[in-house]
Image (cartoon, rainbow, N blue to C red):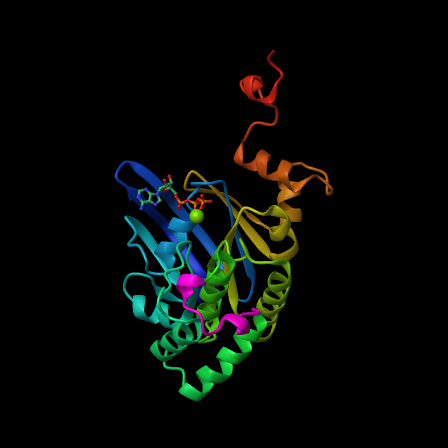
């Protein structure tokens, strides 16, 4: 595919932490203007990949391009075009959500009046108006995640990297947020690259998914395509699909009998 049409492109992208290979020669192409779900079990390398693509961690080897810019050579150009909600959120605990949004908006060069307008809309979308004057320190987990999401959206980025974006967010806000993200993809050709463990979410929300396991990309495609590739029927449970692809165990082998009560 023409490189300019790609939002994310990696070539042999690799990250080692001492002797752990967190991401292992990852080759991935994500077209612009789609919702891409990055799936994989705990410790698969999803967050590490997101960290490398967004400039939060230097790769050990290989290359990556985001929005057409090299993640190492043109890190600032990448940063200008992306919005990120990392796993660890990285919020300023002693600011209010309004102050946080003003800070981030100004860093990205958004005009003050525009920041105010966008802040009102985002707080309304995420139902945070009632808590706008509280410090992040006093926020619940879900409110923190919403604050991080608002910060990722305030400068209307071209590409969004969201690590488990809906985890701990209530269903009403999740629904509103998903509708806005879909609209951004549809109208502005925004790309949403997000990680999740939730297969149902991936099936309903993603145009394409990639499955990573032990740092290696196992497969890429739509969930119906993956079912076909795995030789499963169209109504096969998503859990079965995931287990089949990552090679987990279907049946327990009796080792847990002491816990389940089968051993008396
Ligand atoms: N800072 C770090 N130092 C050492 N090892 C790390 C570090 N960050 C991640 N790892 C290791 O790299 C591997 C991939 O971790 P990563 O956080 O990318 O997984 P993940 O797919 O995001 O998992 P989860 O679904 O649990 O969030 C794991 O083996 C993890 O222990
Ligand atoms: Mg993670």
Residue 63, given in percent of the width and then of the height, sits at: 33, 55
Is residue 135 in the magenta section? yes
Is 58 covered by the magenta stretch? no
**Which residue is at a point 28% across and 36% down the rendered structure image?**
19
Residue at 62% x, 40% y is 229
Q: Residue at x 53, y 36 (%)?
A: 246
Q: Residue furthest left?
A: 18
Q: How many marks?
A: 0
What residue do we see at 43% from left, 67% from top? 83
The residue lying toward the viewer, choosing from 228 and 17, is 17
For this view, does 117 lie left or right of residue 75? right
Task: Report whether residue 226 is seen.
Answer: yes
* Location of the C terminus (image quadrant): top right
Question: Where residue 8 sits in the image (x, y, percent)?
Answer: 44, 60
Can you give x and y, in whole percent of width and height, for residue 200 in the image?
Answer: 64, 49
- Give the residues drawn in magenta, as a range: 126-138
In-image side of 245 versus 152 (left or right)? right
Residue 175: percent from the left, percent from the top?
A: 64, 63
The relative height of residue 155 versus residue 235 in the rendered view (above or below) is below
Which residue occupies the foreground of this view, 10 or 150? 150
Placement of 238 over or under 64, stated as above or below: above
Residue 16 horizontal side relative to residue 150, left or right: left
Residue 1 visible in the displayed image: no
Q: Residue furthest top?
A: 264
Q: Is residue 80 left or right of residue 239?
A: left
């Amino acid at each position: 595919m023409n490189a300019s049409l790609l939002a994310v492109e990696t070539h042999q992208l690799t990250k080692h932490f001492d002797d752990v290979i967190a991401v292992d020669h990852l080759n991935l192409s994500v077209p612009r203007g789609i919702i891409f779900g990055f799936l994989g079990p705990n410790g698969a390398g999803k967050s590490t990949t997101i960290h490398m693509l967004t400039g939060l961690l230097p790769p050990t080897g290989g290359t990556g391009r985001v929005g057409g810019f090299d993640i190492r050579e043109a890190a600032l150009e990448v940063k200008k075009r992306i919005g990120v909600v990392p796993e660890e959120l990285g919020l300023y605990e002693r600011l209010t959500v309004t102050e946080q949004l003003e800070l981030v908006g100004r860093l990205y060069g958004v005009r003050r009046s525009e920041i105010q307008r966008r802040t009102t809309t985002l707080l309304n979308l995420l139902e945070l108006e009632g808590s706008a004057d509280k410090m992040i320190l006093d926020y619940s987990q879900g409110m923190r995640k919403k604050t991080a999401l608002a910060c990722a959206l305030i400068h209307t980025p071209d590409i969004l990297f969201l690590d488990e974006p809906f985890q701990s967010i209530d269903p009403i806000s999740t629904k509103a947020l998903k509708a806005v993200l879909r609209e951004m993809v549809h109208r502005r050709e925004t790309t949403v690259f997000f990680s999740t463990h939730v297969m149902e979410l991936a099936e309903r929300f993603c145009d394409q998914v990639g499955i990573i396991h032990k740092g290696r990309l196992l497969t890429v495609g739509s969930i119906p395509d993956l079912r076909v590739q795995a030789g499963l029927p169209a109504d096969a449970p998503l859990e079965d699909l995931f287990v089949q692809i990552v090679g987990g165990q279907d049946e327990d082998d009796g080792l847990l009998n002491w816990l389940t009560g089968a051993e008396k």
